[in-house]
Image (cartoon, rainbow, N blue to C red):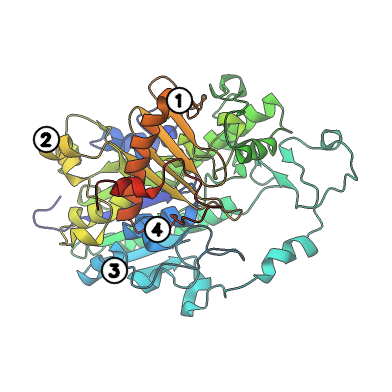
């Protein structure tokens, strides 16, 4: 990196990309992510999203705040959303960088607000998000599009009570009264979707912009490329599918979890996929992995330009995702309210010239959250900021090997969800040994992660674990108090936590 030059930043954010499909895990073919990881990059092996949904997690990435603070709880574009965008007064790290002279370019998925677009937060929008221009967005109230998908859609299967298996095609999930859904397939097939075309367009726009940026080396820039993949349904170009042999695909170790000791909603969700045969489950996993490899290929196109234009060693490169995907674990796919690790664990691989490149250790196992990116990006770019304005904490000291920061770093991870469009209050705390999940809509969960890393056995009902739950609940409520969380109504019909928020004030008079 040129002396005294502020670094450029390229951020490649995927959607649904599981943390264990990127380095250092080696489960997936990812030659381009591997290349920056092996060439002086670093992987945070315990990076987590705050929520198993796009909008709240992306809002956290951009603001450095948790959902209870920034106000985005679920999909901002649907008719029954809990919020259309960020709370009044909430800003993003991009605004600060723009004020400090950076040029910021946004290509692809935004999904932070339906009332404001990237250009309202310091970005120059180069691809997608046109519907937010002029702050038109989606108006509050029912969205006509919601019903049009039923009234105008002729892709329904009318079984009239017949067994779905008698007419179901491979990879198809039949839901009477809903549009037909294919979990996986080959891009370009009759059931292929628009996601591949979208990501090609988004990356092409990013490539063009990146070459232009590299022509002016004195102007620092941030390029954000937001792809849709590997979001379900998993439709993938054939050449990437051909890289994986179905005979090599194994079912997850918790695949046969009957979830009888878990919330009823978990089992009801799992039943959506019960139509699939074991071979179809394996095919869906194969398609997901191929989709991850396809996203890696798109990412590599941007890295190649940085090298060709001589800016590779002047640019911080970040590969991450908004959340993960169950990918067959517990018999589930996609993401949602079940609070299992795969929906929250995301990749985080970063190459920071002259910083990560001089490290000996390539992996960092400390917990980090998407909330930690905002202060970290500002610090990496040499921009001063008010630490009190973020709930996240800069992970730069971890990268630099600061022994004091490493010793005092958090050993807990918290999540916040009010459910997707079905709603359901859920909060969790995870430590290296325990994971406690408060479910406002059903019974709680407790997993001993040292003995049960695949979250198969819920031990919340064991009397000997009651003190452990109380200790974890106290930490969970303290986090909620500090983050202005309002899921604390004491009314008798909704105060269903085993230990209520008052336990954190037990020593106060």
Q: Which mark is residue 403?
A: 2
Residue at mark 4: 68
Q: Earlier in the sequence, mark 1 or mark 4?
A: 4
Q: Residue at x 53, y 21 (%)?
A: 253
The residues tagged by marks 2 and 1 sit, at their Cα atoms, a distance apart of 39 Å
Which residue is more in the foreground, 416 or 347?
416
Number of numbered callouts drawn: 4
325, above or below 152, in the image: above
* Position of residue 242 in the picture relative to residue 356 (left or right): right
Q: Residues within 10 Å of mark 3 (few under 14, many from 20)?
A: some
Residue 508 position, x and y percent, is: 24, 51
Q: Earlier in the sequence, mark 1 or mark 3?
A: 3
Mark 2 falls on what kind of element? helix
Which residue is more in the foreground, 412 or 128?
412
> Would you identify the image quadrant in which residue 209 lies?
bottom left
Q: Earlier in the sequence, mark 2 or mark 1?
A: 2
In front: mark 3 or mark 2? Answer: 2
> Would you identify the image quadrant in which residue 208 lies?
bottom left
In front: mark 1 or mark 4? Answer: 1
């Amino acid at each position: 990196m040129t002396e005294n030059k502020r670094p450029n930043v390229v951020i490649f954010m995927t959607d649904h990309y599981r943390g264990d499909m990127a380095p250092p895990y080696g489960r997936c073919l990812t030659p381009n992510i591997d290349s920056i990881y092996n060439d002086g990059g670093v992987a945070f092996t315990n990076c987590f999203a705050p929520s198993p949904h796009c909008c709240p997690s992306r809002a956290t990435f951009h603001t450095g705040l948790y959902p209870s603070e920034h106000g985005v709880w679920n999909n901002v574009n649907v008719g029954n959303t809990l919020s259309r965008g960020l709370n009044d007064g909430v800003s993003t790290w991009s605004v600060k960088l723009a004020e400090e002279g950076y040029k910021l370019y946004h290509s692809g998925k935004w999904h932070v607000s339906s009332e404001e677009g990237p250009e309202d937060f310091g970005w120059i929008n180069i691809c997608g998000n046109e519907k937010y221009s002029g702050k038109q967005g989606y108006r509050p109230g029912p969205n006509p599009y919601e019903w049009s998908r039923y009234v105008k859609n002729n892709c329904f299967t009318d079984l009239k009570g017949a067994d779905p298996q008698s007419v179901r095609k491979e990879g198809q999930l039949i839901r009477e009264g809903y549009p037909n859904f294919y979990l996986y397939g080959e891009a370009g097939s009759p059931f292929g979707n628009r996601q591949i075309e979208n990501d090609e367009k988004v990356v092409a726009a990013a490539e063009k912009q990146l070459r232009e940026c590299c022509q002016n080396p004195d102007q620092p820039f941030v390029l954000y490329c937001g792809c849709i993949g590997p979001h379900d349904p998993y439709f993938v170009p054939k050449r990437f599918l051909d890289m994986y042999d179905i005979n090599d695909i194994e079912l997850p170790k918790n695949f046969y979890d009957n979830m009888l000791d878990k919330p009823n909603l978990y089992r009801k969700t799992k039943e959506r996929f019960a139509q699939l045969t074991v071979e179809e489950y394996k095919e869906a996993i194969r398609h997901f992995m191929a989709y991850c490899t396809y996203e890696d290929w798109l990412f590599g196109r941007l890295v190649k330009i940085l090298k060709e234009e001589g800016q590779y060693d002047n640019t911080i490169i970040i590969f991450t995702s908004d959340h993960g995907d169950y990918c067959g674990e517990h018999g589930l796919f996609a993401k949602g309210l079940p609070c299992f690790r795969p929906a929250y664990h995301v990749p985080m691989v970063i190459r920071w010239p002259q910083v990560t490149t001089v490290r000996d250790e390539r992996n960092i196992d400390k917990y980090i959250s998407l909330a930690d990116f905002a202060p970290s990006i500002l610090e990496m770019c040499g921009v001063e900021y008010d630490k009190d304005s973020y709930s996240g904490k800069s992970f730069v000291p971890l990268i630099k090997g600061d022994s004091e920061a490493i010793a005092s770093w958090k050993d807990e991870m918290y999540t916040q969800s009010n459910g997707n469009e079905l709603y359901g209050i859920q909060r969790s705390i995870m430590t290296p040994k325990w994971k406690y999940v408060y479910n406002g809509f059903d019974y709680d969960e407790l997993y001993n992660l040292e003995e049960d890393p695949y979250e198969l056995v819920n031990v919340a009902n064991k009397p000997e674990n009651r003190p452990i739950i109380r200790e974890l609940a106290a930490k969970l409520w303290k986090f909620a108090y500090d983050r202005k969380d309002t899921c604390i109504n004491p009314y008798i019909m909704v105060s269903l936590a085993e230990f209520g928020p008052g336990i954190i004030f037990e020593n106060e008079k």
